[in-house]
């Protein structure tokens, strides 16, 4: 499966880009100065397999809090990379360099202060830290809006002066992002901007996200469409599903998107038909039971199909299949080959589990 070639950037103890896994990240929503609450939330995110966490840094007190948060996490043996999210103040961004693994700046909020950006680059280079140049359609600089409007070209031109400076300073530990709350524009921006960036030699890894997506099912749908569309284009090296919820909820959704797009298989990929009048067993119950008993497995695909009409064809690339074969009867498959036929539905799930386990034993 094609993936856009990108440079490899190190963020703390983690590598981003190239052939490295597409990383999952989130952002804490606690007041940064509340060190206990922030550390607690980061611990929970770490336990949920979040790989990078972003922290809002708005003032000198937050910079000091970041320092103390990092010390606390190190004592807890949590080495998840920390990203300082800085808007408006170049001096705050510079102050964060010793304590963050990556600094996120918004060109639209940097006030054209290129001298400060050069200083930020110099310090990041000395300290071995990365910088994310995060452009947002909602905060393009006035001069960009006047010349290019709120457009993909405006997003591109917002980032280019900073990239040119980084190039002149021989600094390559950069991550790019082009965010919007509008799904269609977010997808258009990446498809328009990245070919230009690559032609100019700015093939840096890309962070994907639909910003301000909202919550519940609609927020998840927006994130899945925007991020998923670009992942299928081969674009994206790290993702965040932005939800107006507990940040922990973002992590499972992100991994589901990666798995559905075939970009990172962390668990079992399930295929199941919606069923129809031809289905002669309780497919919802069976599907849920199979999921429950195989949830600990990784890297396999299991299909649960209601009948033989679509069963064999639709489960063609599955590793294992459970297919209805008539009243109370089931056929079991391994990679498109029927292993057992017309067995009792009462025994079918246990027989399927035996087939899966035997296959796993043979691979060891």
Image: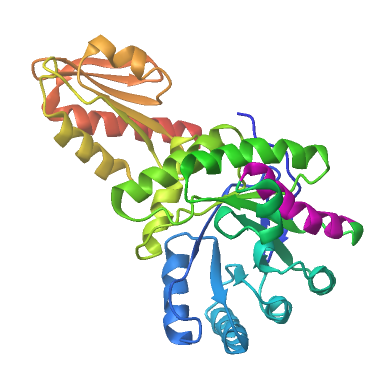
Q: Between residues 34 and 183, which one lies in front from this camera angle?
A: 183
Q: Residue at 72% x, 59% y: name it.
A: 10
Q: Between residues 103 and 106, which one lies in front from this camera angle?
A: 106
Q: Between residues 289 and 175, which one lies in front from this camera angle?
A: 175
For the question of whether residue 20 can be seen, the reply is: yes
Dividing the picture into quarters, in which one does residue 307 lie? Answer: top left
Q: Left or right: where does residue 360 sit relative to residue 355?
A: right
Q: Left or right: where does residue 309 sit relative to residue 152?
A: left
Image quarter where the N terminus lies is top right
Whole-percent x, y for residue 261 in the image:
48, 35
Considering only vertical position in the picture, is 181 above or below 234?
A: below
Q: Residue at 80% x, 56% y: name it.
A: 161
| Residues drawn in magenta | 151-167
Considering only vertical position in the picture, is 55 above or below 162?
A: below
Residue with the most extreme top position = 309
Whole-percent x, y for residue 360 in the image:
43, 35
Q: Left or right: where does residue 328 sit relative to residue 263?
A: left
For the question of whether residue 258 can be seen, the reply is: no
Considering only vertical position in the picture, is 15 above or below 290?
A: below
Q: Is residue 112 magenta?
A: no
Q: Is residue 165 magenta?
A: yes
Residue with the most extreme front position = 146
């Amino acid at each position: 499966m094609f993936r856009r070639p990108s440079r490899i950037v190190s963020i703390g103890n983690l590598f981003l880009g190239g052939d490295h896994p597409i990383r999952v990240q989130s952002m804490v929503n606690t007041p940064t100065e509340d060190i206990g609450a922030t550390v607690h939330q980061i611990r929970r995110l770490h336990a949920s397999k979040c790989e990078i966490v972003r922290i809002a840094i708005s003032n000198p007190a937050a910079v000091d809090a970041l320092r103390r948060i990092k010390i606390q996490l190190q004592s807890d043996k949590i080495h998840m990379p920390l990203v300082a999210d800085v808007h408006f103040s170049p001096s705050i961004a510079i102050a964060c360099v010793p304590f963050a693994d990556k600094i996120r700046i918004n060109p639209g909020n940097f006030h054209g202060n290129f001298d400060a950006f050069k200083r930020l680059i110099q310090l990041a280079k000395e300290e071995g830290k990365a910088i994310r140049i995060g452009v947002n359609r909602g905060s393009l600089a006035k001069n960009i809006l006047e010349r290019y409007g709120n457009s993909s070209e405006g997003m591109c031109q917002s980032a280019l002066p900073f990239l040119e400076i980084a190039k002149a300073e021989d600094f390559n530990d950069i991550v790019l992002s082009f965010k919007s709350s509008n799904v269609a524009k977010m997808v258009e921006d990446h498809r328009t901007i990245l070919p230009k960036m690559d032609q100019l030699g700015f093939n840096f890894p890309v962070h994907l996200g639909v910003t301000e997506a909202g919550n519940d099912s609609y927020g998840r749908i927006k994130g899945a469409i925007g991020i998923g569309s670009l992942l299928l284009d081969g674009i994206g090296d790290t993702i965040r599903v932005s939800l107006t919820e507990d940040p922990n909820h973002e992590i499972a959704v992100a991994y589901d998107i990666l798995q559905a797009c075939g970009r990172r298989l962390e668990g079992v990929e399930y295929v199941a038909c919606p069923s129809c009048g031809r289905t002669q067993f309780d497919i919802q119950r069976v599907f849920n039971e199979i999921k429950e008993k195989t949830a600990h497995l990784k890297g396999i695909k299991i299909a649960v199909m209601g009948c033989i009409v679509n069963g064999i064809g639709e489960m063609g690339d599955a590793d294992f299949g459970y297919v209805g074969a008539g009243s109370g009867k089931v056929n079991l498959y391994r990679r498109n080959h029927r292993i057992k036929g017309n067995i009792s539905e009462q025994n079918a799930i246990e027989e399927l589990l035996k087939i899966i386990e035997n296959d796993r034993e043979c691979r060891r």
